[in-house]
Amino acid sequence: MKSQIITITKTAEEYLSKLITEKNEPGTAVRVFISDPGTPHAETCLAYAKPDEIVPSDVLISLPTLSIYVEERSIPFLEDSEVNYDIDNFGCLLYTSPSPRD
C-alpha cells in the first residue's frame, strides 16, 4: 500500500502482521525510523513497538492488518522508500530507499 511516506507491499504487510500476531502482545505495532539520519552512519530500522513506545509526534500509517508508526524526523529520508517481503528469495524482508544518508 502506498502512503505519502513509504510504500508497504501487500506481502510485507502480511508478513509483518503475522509476526505481530505471533508475538501475542495486544497493541503491538511496527515503528520505522532512521538512526543518525543524514549522516554516514544512518541506518533504517523497523522495530516492534508497544503502545508505551510510540512517540506522540510519530505519524501513523493505518493498514488493513496492522499499524505502522513513522518517526517524524525520519520522514524526509523515508520518502519514496519501500518495504517488501520477497517470497521468491527465501522469504526476505527487503527495504529500499533512495538514501537515508542524504
Image (cartoon, grey):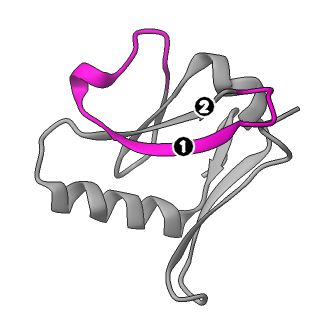
The answer to whether the residue labelled 1 contacts the one labelled 2, judged by CB atoms less than 8 Å apart, is yes
Q: Residues within 10 Å of mark 2 (few under 14, many from 20)?
A: some
Q: Report the residue that reaches farthest toward the front.
A: 41
Q: Which range is magenta?
A: 37-59
Above or below: residue 76 compared with residue 99: above
> Dot 1 lies on which element?
strand
Relative to 85, 54 lies left or right: left
- Image quadrant in which you'd find residue 51: top left
Please state the horizontal and vertical placement of residue 79, each as a whole percent of the image.
77, 36
- Image quadrant in which you'd find residue 19: bottom left
Q: Which residue is mark 1?
A: 45
Above or below: residue 59 compared with residue 5: above
Quadrant of the drawing holding the C terminus: top right
Residue at 66%, 25% in the rendered image: 74
> Dot 2 lies on which element?
strand
From mark 1 to mark 2, how far is it between C-alphas? 7 Å
Residue at 33%, 58% in the rendered image: 17
Relative to 74, 14 lies left or right: left
Q: Which residue is mark 2?
A: 35
